[in-house]
Image (cartoon, rainbow, N blue to C red):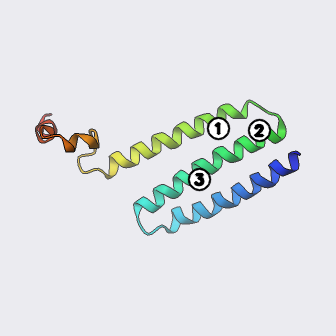
Amino acid sequence: MSSWYLLLATGMLLTIGGALWRVWRGPDQTDRMMAAQLVGSGGVATILLLAAATQEWAMLDVALVLALLAALAAIAFVKSVRGSGRGDPEDDARPDAAQADEAP
């Protein structure tokens, strides 16, 4: 049964390789960030499969930390692409948002 886990983990590593190529050659920042998110998700999936195959359950903690870092990277990307680099994008929909951006 563990050979299936290893085969799936190998397939996930190939997916990660394709995503890394897209990070390197991506036409714009958004494509590169989405590929980086795929690398993070593929890494989590690979670690989970290897944990199940080897019965090393401590790897679940590593997968959880990697998933949290991937989420934080997505938030950082959105904040860096946004014009002001701060605040909540939903604030733009409110009429008092212009006044909030002007405050120090």
Distance from Cα at disc 3 to Cα at disc 1: 13 Å
- Which amino acid type is marked by label 1? Ala
Mark 3 — residue?
39
Mark 2 — residue?
51
Confirm or deny contact between disc 2 and disc 3 (CB under 8 A).
no
Mark 1 — residue?
63
What is the x, y in percent for residue 10? 76, 56
Earlier-in-chain disc, 1 versus 2? 2
Distance from Cα at disc 2 to Cα at disc 3: 18 Å
Q: Tell me the residue at 28%/45% (across/down).
A: 85
Distance from Cα at disc 1 to Cα at disc 2: 9 Å
Q: Secondary structure at mark 2?
A: helix
Q: Is residue 27 left or right of residue 6?
A: left
Earlier-in-chain disc, 2 versus 3? 3
Confirm or deny contact between disc 3 and disc 1 (CB under 8 A).
no
Q: Is residue 33 left or right of residue 80?
A: right
Q: Secondary structure at mark 3?
A: helix
Mark 3 burial class by Cα count in 10 Å: few <14, some 14-19, many 20+: many
Q: Secondary structure at mark 1?
A: helix
Q: Tell me the residue at 72%/34% (across/down).
A: 59
- Which amino acid type is marked by label 2? Ala
Which corner quadrant holds the C terminus?
top left
- Which amino acid type is marked by label 3? Val
Q: Which mark is residue 72?
A: none
What is the x, y in percent for residue 35? 53, 58
Confirm or deny contact between disc 1 and disc 2 (CB under 8 A).
yes
Mark 1 burial class by Cα count in 10 Å: few <14, some 14-19, many 20+: many
Q: Tell me the residue at 12%/37% (across/down).
A: 96
Earlier-in-chain disc, 3 versus 1? 3
